[in-house]
C-alpha cells in the first residue's frame, strides 16, 4: 500500500509479557518516528530513526522499551515485561526527508492493552 | 512530556459555521503541521507550514504560521458533519521530533 502500515492493530498482553509492534513506513522515506498516545491525549514522541540509525531515543519511558530499524525500512518497537501503564496507542510515522521537519505521515496505530 | 497548548479544548458548532482554533508554544518552531484524528485511527495530515507568516489552504481549511513562530492557527470554513474529530497541531523545533498539541475536539451539530 501507499501509506504507513502498522501491525497488529490491536494487542492484548498479560502483565509481564513481551510484545513486538511492527511498522512498515512509506517506501523511500528516510525518517521514521514512534509515538505513544494515551487516551484523550496528543501523541508523545518516543524515538526517531534516520534510515537505520536511531538518532533520538529520548522519549522512551524506560529500558523496557527498545526499537530497531535494521535495514532502514521496517521498524519494530519492542516492550519487555509489559506493565499496565504501557497501555496506549503506539503510532508510527514516516517522512521523506532526514532530520524531520517535513511532512510526517502516520499509520493507524497499534492499540496495546495490558491486563 | 512537553505538549503544545491548543484552544479551544473542545467546541460544538452548527453545520455551516466557520471554526477557528489555535496552538501556542513558548518555543520557536521551524515547521507547523496540522492533523485530524478520527476515533480508532491515526492522525491524518491536513496542512504543513514552513515559513513564518505563511498562509496555506487545503479546500475549506486554512492554516497560518504565526509571525512570532510560536503559534499557528487553523480555520475551517462552512463546517460539515464529517469535520467531527480531534485536531492536533505539531511543531518541529529543528531537533528530530515533532511536539504535539493537546488537541481540539470538534463536534458539529447538523
Image: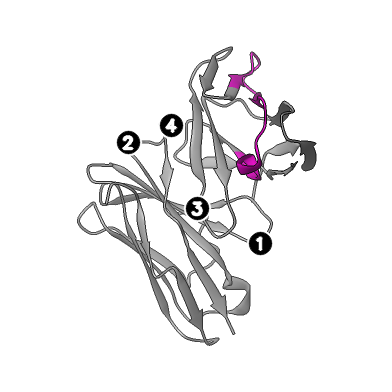
Disc 2/disc 4 C-alpha distance (Å): 8 Å
> Is disc 3 in the same subunit as disc 1?
no
Name the residue tied to disc 3. B42
Compared with B3, B20 (above or below) is: above
Q: Which residues are magenta?
A: B63-88
According to the image, label 1 marks what residue? A39
Secondary structure under the numbered disc 2 in the rendered image: loop
Q: How is the image coloured?
A: one colour
The label number, if any, that marks residue A98 in the structure image: 2
- Whether residue A104 appears in magenta in the rendering, the answer is no
| CA gap, disc 3 and disc 2 | 22 Å
Place of residue B85 in the rendered image (x, y in percent of width and height, measured from the top left): 64, 46
State the residue lying farthest toward the front: B110
Q: Tell me, yes or no, if residue B8 can be seen here.
A: no
Which callout, 3 or 2, points to the residue nearer the camera? 3
Q: Residues within 10 Å of mark 2 (few under 14, many from 20)?
A: some
The CA span between labels 2 and 1 is 30 Å
Task: From the image, state whether disc 1 or disc 4 is nearer to you.
Answer: 1
Q: Secondary structure at mark 1?
A: loop
Q: Is residue B7 left or right of residue A54?
A: right
Q: CA distance from mark 1 to mark 4?
A: 26 Å
Q: Whole-Å distance between the Cαs marked 3 and 1? A: 13 Å
Q: Are marks 1 and 4 on the same chain?
A: yes
* Chain name for mark 4: A
Amino acid at each position: 500500500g501507499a501509506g504507513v502500515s502498522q501491525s497488529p492493530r490491536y494487542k492484548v498482553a498479560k502483565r509481564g509479557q513481551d510484545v513486538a509492534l511492527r511498522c512498515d513506513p512509506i517506501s523511500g522515506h528516510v525518517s521514521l518516528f514512534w509515538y505513544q498516545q494515551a487516551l484523550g491525549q496528543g501523541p508523545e514522541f518516543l524515538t526517531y530513526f534516520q534510515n537505520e540509525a536511531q538518532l533520538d531515543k529520548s522519549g522512551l519511558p524506560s529500558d523496557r522499551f527498545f526499537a530497531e530499524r535494521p535495514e532502514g525500512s521496517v521498524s519494530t518497537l519492542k516492550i519487555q515485561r509489559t506493565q499496565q501503564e504501557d497501555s496506549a496507542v503506539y503510532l508510527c510515522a514516516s517522512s521523506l526527508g532526514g532530520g524531520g521537519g517535513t511532512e510526517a505521515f502516520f499509520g493507524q496505530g497499534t492499540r496495546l492493552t495490558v491486563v | 512530556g512537553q505538549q503544545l497548548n491548543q484552544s479551544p479544548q473542545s467546541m460544538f458548532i452548527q453545520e455551516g459555521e466557520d471554526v477557528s482554533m489555535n496552538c501556542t508554544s513558548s518555543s520557536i518552531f521551524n515547521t507547523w503541521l496540522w492533523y485530524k484524528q478520527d476515533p480508532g485511527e491515526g492522525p491524518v495530515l491536513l496542512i504543513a507550514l514552513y515559513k513564518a507568516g505563511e498562509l496555506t489552504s487545503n479546500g475549506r481549511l486554512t492554516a497560518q504560521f504565526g509571525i512570532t513562530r510560536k503559534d499557528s492557527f487553523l480555520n475551517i470554513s462552512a463546517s460539515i458533519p464529517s469535520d467531527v474529530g480531534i485536531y492536533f497541531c505539531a511543531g518541529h523545533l529543528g531537533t528530530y521530533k515533532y511536539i504535539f498539541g493537546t488537541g481540539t475536539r470538534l463536534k458539529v451539530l447538523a
